[in-house]
Image (cartoon, grey):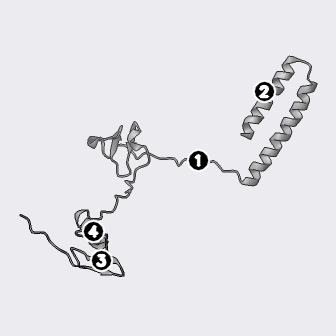
Amino acid sequence: MKKKIEYYTEVRNGVKFMECRCCGTMIQVTDSTTAITCDICVREEYNKQFPFTPSVRYKPSGKPRGWKFMKEYVHKDGTVYYKGVEQPELKGTIEPTKIQPKVKKAKMSKGQRAQLYNDTLSKIHKLKKQLSKAKFKKDQRRITSEIKKLQRVIR
């Protein structure tokens, strides 16, 4: 038969306190509690079982994005890759691939967007006036197509 371990308990102002089974600090418990481990000891045990390992960060390889998907890519050091597979027998025979940087589109400022919005609304208004005065079907079609184009610009 197993020997039952009794931990030190005391009652302070009607509240039961029991000592931690590892370090012996007094912790508030309920009447039915038989043993307790404090949060500090639990944290220490967890850290022993699962030590902290920092996440692996991105390490640049010196190659451009998508180099594996290029039909042929030649690195600066002369290494040749065909569809992402290195070709050691061709090393140094071809000159390095020149990568052109992506051209960035200039973004409009908030004021410029507001100005464009107001200009297109005024153009649409003028075209709708012309549409009401237009007699021929061909003129009406031309005006309605222009209105649709301007409505796409607004969106």
Q: Do the numbered discs 2 and 4 sit on residues whose CB atoms are within 8 Å?
A: no
Of callouts 1 and 4, the N-terminal one: 4
Place residue 2 in its image quadrant. bottom left
Task: Answer with left or right where residue 3 lies relative to residue 114.
Answer: left
Closer mark to the observer between disc 3 and disc 2: 3
Q: Which element type, helix, strand or loop, lies under badge 2?
A: helix
Circle 2 packing at 10 Å, graded few (<14), some (14-19), many (20+), is few
Q: Nearer the viewer, residue 151 or 21?
A: 21
What's the distance in space between the residues labelled 3 and 2, CA to CA?
Answer: 83 Å
Residue 45: give x, y in percent of width and height.
24, 68
Of callouts 2 and 4, the N-terminal one: 4
What's the distance in space between the residues labelled 1 and 3, CA to CA?
Answer: 70 Å
Give the residue drawn at x 29%, y 70%.
31
Work out which residue is located at the far top of the displayed protein and give it.
Answer: 137
- Say which amino acid is labelled 3: Phe
Q: Which mark is residue 17?
A: 3
Closer mark to the observer between disc 1 and disc 4: 4
Closer mark to the observer between disc 2 and disc 4: 4
Place residue 66 in its image quadrant. top left
- Say which amino acid is labelled 4: Val
Q: Which element type, helix, strand or loop, lies under badge 3?
A: strand
- Say which amino acid is labelled 1: Val
What's the distance in space between the residues labelled 1 and 4, CA to CA?
Answer: 55 Å
Q: Which mark is residue 103?
A: 1
Closer mark to the observer between disc 1 and disc 2: 2
What's the distance in space between the residues labelled 2 and 4, CA to CA?
Answer: 72 Å
Q: Nearer the viewer, residue 65 or 125?
A: 125
What's the distance in space between the residues labelled 1 and 2, CA to CA?
Answer: 31 Å
